[in-house]
């Protein structure tokens, strides 16, 4: 059986932060990996002073620049099939943060009709025929409107793609759907890291690291069904993160991003299975270790 994995993300860099090691590992296994990015990240916060002119408040060319960043990042992970939602005919614009003027502007991804955007993803699903879909939870991981909309679009498209009465191209039902997650215990362990603690002291972060525990993507351990060991691909993940220069400031095995928050980079990536059956091999916590468990022929 030919295996296919589809990931749906909101902006360039989200894919590597959440699933970089997973993507690289499955590419190495010969799995067809498709990344769909919903916007070009035009409203992102530029963290590199010499590139500040790219911002939407200046030259408004950040989206074009981030296309190149994404191309280079995917090359580091070995992912050749990466596309923007609706391309080449449509472009969904980054919506900015909730409550901003950009968020209310017409033409943003957040304001797009759900079924219109989902129909574009249905075409991808029916062409690539993935057995496994990865996206965000219903909170979009941390509440960004584009992340929430990406979740909604992915879930709606999976439903529509399986409906033989909808559109053309033949129905395709995805066997397993996962939402990216982080178990609470992993965050607690990370917060006690000496390296991260020293980093916090030196940088005087605006947000204390304990606030990570309150993020919506941090789940009670019992809700995290799947733990993927991609540590053999941590170096590839770090190399890919380094390509997202406008959004991330790298420091060895850590990166900083918006709001002066930092994270230690690792190859273990976690998921919650929301469609399909959990299947072995299981680890000592009773979690799946393979997103295609129960699907492989």
Image: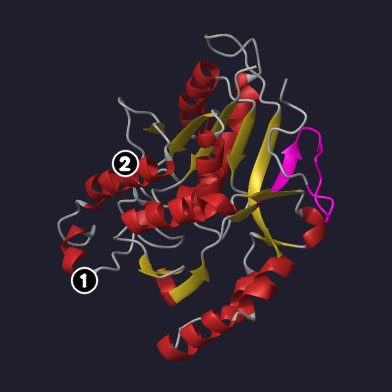
Q: 245 or 258: nearer the eye?
A: 245
In screen coordinates, is 243 left or right of 10?
left
Please tell me which of labels 1 and 2 falls first in the chain. Answer: 1
Circle 1 Cα neighbour tier, 10 Å, few/some/many (<14 / 14–19 / ≥20):
few
Q: Which residue is mark 2?
A: 71
Identify whether 161 is placed above or below 146.
Answer: above
289 part of magenta stretch: no
Foreground: disc 1 or disc 2: 2
In screen coordinates, is 123 left or right of 181?
left
Q: Which residue is mark 1?
A: 49
Identify whether 127 is placed above or below 270.
Answer: above
Quadrant of residue 218 within the rendered picture:
bottom right
Q: Secondary structure at mark 1?
A: helix
Name the residue: 62% across, 28% down.
Answer: 158
Name the residue: 64% across, 62% down.
Answer: 216
In screen coordinates, is 287 left or right of 188?
right
Q: Secondary structure at mark 2?
A: helix
The stretch in magenta equals 270-287
Image quarter (top left, top right, bottom left or bottom right) of the C terminus: top right
């Amino acid at each position: 059986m030919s295996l296919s994995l589809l990931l749906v993300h909101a902006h360039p860099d989200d894919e590597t932060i959440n699933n970089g090691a997973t993507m690289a590992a499955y590419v190495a296994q010969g799995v067809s990996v498709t990344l769909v990015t919903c916007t070009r990240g035009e409203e992102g916060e530029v963290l590199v002073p010499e590139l500040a002119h790219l911002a939407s408040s200046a030259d408004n060319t950040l989206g074009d620049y981030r296309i190149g960043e994404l191309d280079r990042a995917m090359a580091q992970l070995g992912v050749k099939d990466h596309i923007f939602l609706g391309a080449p005919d449509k472009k969904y614009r980054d919506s900015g943060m909730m409550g901003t003027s950009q968020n209310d502007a017409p033409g943003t991804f957040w304001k797009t009709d759900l079924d219109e955007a989902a129909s574009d993803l249905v075409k991808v699903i029916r062409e690539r025929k993935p057995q496994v879909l990865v996206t965000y939870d219903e909170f979009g991981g941390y509440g960004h409107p584009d992340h929430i909309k990406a979740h909604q679009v992915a879930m709606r498209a999976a439903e529509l793609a399986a409906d033989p009465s909808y559109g053309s191209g033949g129905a395709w039902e995805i066997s397993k759907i996962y939402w990216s997650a982080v178990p609470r215990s992993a965050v607690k362990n990370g917060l006690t890291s000496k390296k991260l603690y020293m980093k916090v002291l030196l940088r005087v972060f605006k947000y204390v690291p304990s606030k990570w525990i309150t993020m919506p993507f941090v789940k009670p351990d019992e809700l995290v069904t799947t733990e993927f060991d991609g540590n053999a691909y941590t170096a590839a993940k770090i190399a890919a993160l380094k390509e997202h220069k406008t959004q991330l400031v790298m420091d060895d095995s850590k990166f900083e991003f918006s709001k002066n928050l930092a994270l230690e980079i690792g190859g273990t990536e976690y998921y919650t299975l929301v469609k399909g059956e959990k299947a072995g091999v299981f680890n000592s916590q009773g979690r799946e270790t393979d997103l295609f468990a129960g699907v492989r022929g």
